[in-house]
Image (spheres, rainbow, N blue to C red):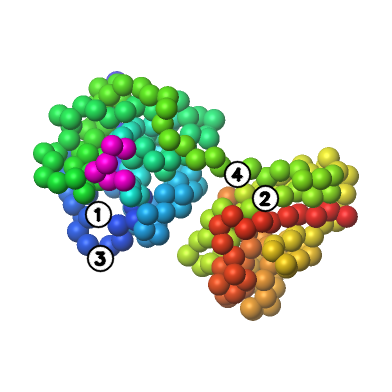
Amino acid sequence: MDLARNTVTLTTDFGTKDYFVGAMKGVILGINPDAKIVDISHEVVSHDVWGAAYLTGSSFKFFPNRTVHIVVVDPGVGSTRRAIMAVTDKHYFIAPDNGVLSFVYADPAFSRVIHITSEHYFLPVIGSTFHARDIFAPCAAWLSKGVEVEKFGEEITDFVRFNIPAPRKESASVLAGEIVYTDKFGNSITNISFTDLRDFVESAGIESYKIQVKDMVIDKLAPFYSSINKGEHGVVVNGNGFLEIFVNHGDARRTLGLKRGDSVKVVFG
């Protein structure tokens, strides 16, 4: 049976100014010249583990089965934090054990986590600051060549994971959520999905609603960004099916002063 897993993705906060990403790719290709390397993002805000977790959860399902995903936002590099490999029924993830795979763990297809301890798959360690090159990249490359998951270490159950906030029914007429991520355009993405909204409408039996963000009230969903005037703010259902606060041709984060964790409420009636 062909065990090859030739697609390898990279998500980091390394940017593209330095040699970091290039060195990782060199290591992967040196071990598996047939690897197809895809950059998801190297512009994660420095040290923003949550942001990398969100990007990973939003992107991995669109890749072919047996893809290997390297996710490295690692403020604890060189410390006692573990290197891990997570497995779902179709995908593999290599990352530091700092919660960066939390959205993967929340997926119904999540299976298990391996603590990577088999050092013969590592590069010779020169220092303690570049585990992405010395540990994560070579392990991903060997995995992509078909090395079995079990050969990298033992399964663990005490891996680090974040609590991913879910929308909640605050009252019979209020669905409460929060902003969980802001994209490059300044659009503020909430944890309230259109499905959540639809289900609440059906259970409450009330079709009219307003969306309250801090001290702003938005009367209805916009069908698309340019359906409102330039500079106006609105709410749209984004490509992942979640409510997203935006300013047409603007930056909602700056214009409206929004940040991760800010309350968003759908008020019915």
Q: Is residue 174 left or right of residue 263?
A: right
Q: Is residue 176 above or below residue 120?
A: below
Choose the circle earlier in sequence order: 2 or 3.
3
Does the residue at mark 4 contact the one at mark 1 (Cβ under 8 Å)? no
Q: Secondary structure at mark 2?
A: strand
Tell me what residue is drawn at x 25 percent, y 22 percent: 151
CA gap, disc 2 to disc 4?
8 Å
| Of labels 2 and 3, the one closer to you | 2
Q: Hey, which quadrant is residue 267 in on the image?
A: bottom right
Q: Tell me, for residue 165, which label it has, or none.
A: 4
| Of labels 4 and 3, the one closer to you | 4
Q: Is residue 235 above or below residue 104?
A: below
Segment tinted magenta in the rendering: 76-81
Residue at the disc numbered 2: 177
Q: Tell me, for residue 17, which label it has, or none.
A: 3
- What secondary structure is the magenta-colored segment mainly? loop
CA gap, disc 2 to disc 3?
37 Å
CA gap, disc 4 to disc 1?
32 Å
Residue 241's x, y, as percent? 62, 50
CA gap, disc 3 to disc 1?
9 Å
Residue at the disc numbered 1: 21
Tell me what residue is drawn at x 46 percent, y 52 percent: 51
Q: Is residue 147 above or below residue 185?
A: above
Choose the circle earlier in sequence order: 4 or 1.
1
**Callout 2 crowding tier (Cα within 10 Å): few <14, some 14–19, many ≥20:** many
Tell me what residue is drawn at x 43 percent, y 40 percent: 99
> Magenta includes 78?
yes
Whether residue 166 is visible: yes
